[in-house]
Image (cartoon, grey):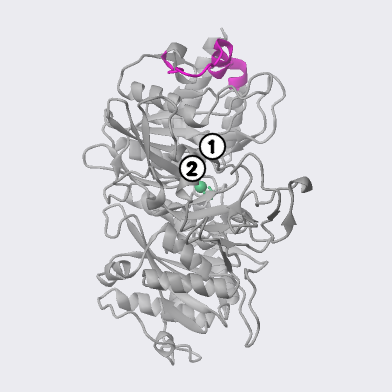
Amino acid sequence: MALADIFTRPATGGIRQVTPTAAYGARPSIAGPGMAALEEWVDGVAVLTKPDRIHWVDGSRSENEALLRGMVDDGTLIKLNPEWRPGSYLARSHPSDVARTEGRTYIASEAEIDAGPTNNWADPAEMRETLTGIFEGAMRGRTMYVVPFSMGAVGGPLSHIGVQITDSPYAVASIGIMTRVGTDVLREIATGAAWVKTIHSVGAPLAPGQADVAWPCNDEKYIVHFPETLEVWSFGSGYGGNAILAKKCFALRIASVIGRDEGWLAEHMLLIRVISPEGKAYHVAAAFPSACGKTNLAMLRPTIPGWRVETLGDDIAWLRPGEDGRLWAINPEAGFFGVAPGTGESTNVTAVETLWGNTIFTNVALRADGDVWWEGLTDTPPAELTDWEGNPWTPAMGRPAAHPNSRFTVSAGQCPQIAPDWDAPEGVPLDAILFGGRRATNVPLVVEATDWTHGVFLGSNISSERTAAAEGTVGELRRDPFAMLPFCGYNMADYFGHWLSVGQKLRFDRAPRIFQVNWFRKGADGRFLWPGFGDNARVIDWIIRRVEGAVPAVDSPVGRLPRTEDLNLDGIHVPQQDLDELFAVDPALWLSETDLTEQFYSTFEGRVPAPLYAELAALRYRLRRAQG
Ligand code: OXD
Ligand code: MN
């Protein structure tokens, strides 16, 4: 029985003797056949969680201002000095609640095999009981907010709707930036549009008269996805992806399941438009594991003259085959929830400019003048700061002032190079897809897949080195296929199969080309071989010339490589020896890497699609031939 049924069945023990939201006050005055189900669900959650108040969020400016004012008054937010950072705030989380908690994140599918070996599985019936227990009275003393949101433009052909119930005003303000919130969405629901149920509580009920704390949370945490009923339940954390359920929980884990069923893909990808010196536009989506510079690439300022990049998204892309045989992409989000440390003038000046105001910062350091700071914003830290925990800090202390996972939350529209049509409901047609990891060894700067299946094979092998490799070996790899390891809502081997089947819906001459990139390869002396950042545009320039058929490529056992003379290196000096190392393919090392791939595939107990095993066999054959 679905948990929603517990709420909607006829009252036993009196739970439906009052209609709670009526007792709590005004409901939205929107009528339509879809509203009853929404109100019934809200009633049920209120009966279970027993909030003091219910607030239906309308997404208006005045509502947002009142919410922010309330959080400043009760100490949840610090208002930053408007002279430096207008309309901006700092939140300090509890020190135990600073990141997504993957160990407490569950896929509660009916069959364990549907969660697969890369997810924590939970029995849905047992999990519903557990959640019913911990959500009982969880919102006492608090306001329960009902937040209708759309991922993608409201009513757009690739968009999907959700409703988040939460007792965290910080989450409401963040969802207001990261998604399209408000009454327009309710109108869609009223007319009968399908929507996803997401419920969040910080898990810190207040007894009558009990004072609140700045960042309520609970040591016990649950982030639970029910893929069959398209629900998310999150308890105990107020931070990021644990609390903004539209993001990783809905737009990736639940959306990946919807995409599997409907024939499209929900991906952990940035989305950009690259404009060539001739003024021609190309669209590129790129998957990188967390902390590999996705936001930097999304906001790239090319160092090669004439090229421009427009930002479309920095974290999530939904990709859908169009009737024209192309793969169309939208960024379903409306804002950026980016990692602050490492974002500075030299690494991502676009992000720095985006953050001029109207930003919620979390766990960064506070300057004496009421502005914020984090490691990497400037080369030299201010002489004194208040650190992310609220303690005095000086550089001499030798520890970071901002938490390494401190964040900014800001509207996409504030990005100075946002594409003018970033919000277009139909999205953009993709020309290229990039897969990248953080590999010190082995993986060349750029490799072109020979076809879609080979591209899927490359995506299934994204990995980063966990440990430094001894010379002549491969370091221990943290595998992150398609950069989706923590975000795929179903069995990852089936997901590989789904990628193959989406490829079959594309016209072969219109499908995006797939490339593997690696900005992080190091030389034998431990130095990065490639300058990275704005110079990554030089790699994209080659990719686009490949898409145009303007340059030949060199076949290698691992895929097609550039001729080094085709890389645009005007204005920088990369020694020939470094270029040779950047593209070197050592067959013996690669053969040991294929053993690791086989080991990884075997964890799926026969479910990895045969075409990927065929790719593995063909790769081994080519490597052995290259060995001679
Ligand atoms: C993120 C992540 O927060 O990928 O975007 O971890
Ligand atoms: Mn991400």
Viewed as shown, does residue 623 lie left or right of 515? right
Q: Amino acid at mark 2?
A: Thr
Residue 289 x/y as whole percent:
54, 41
* In the foreground, 295 or 228: 295
Seen as rendered, the residue at the extreme top is 628
Please state which of residues 194 and 433 is positioned toward the viewer in this rendering.
433
For disc 1, the marked residue is 347
**Quick check: 301 left or right of 545?**
right
Q: What amino acid does circle 1 point to? A: Thr
Compared across the picture, whether 276 is left or right of 93 comes to left
Magenta region: which residues? 566-591
- In the rendered image, residue 576 lying in the magenta stretch gets the answer yes
Q: Residue furthest right?
A: 397
Q: Quick check: 109 left or right of 520?
A: left
On the image, the x and y values in percent for residue 356 come to 47, 52
Instruction: Indicate which disc residue 109 carries.
Output: none
Q: Residue furthest left?
A: 324
Query: In this orientation, does residue 288 appear?
Result: no
Number of numbered tags placed on the structure image: 2
Q: Which residue is mark 2?
A: 295
* Residue 592 is covered by the magenta coloring: no
Q: In the figure, 628 relative to 623: above or below?
A: above
Q: Secondary structure at mark 2?
A: helix
Looking at the image, which residue is at 65% across and 81% down?
211
The first of marks 2 and 1 along the sequence is 2
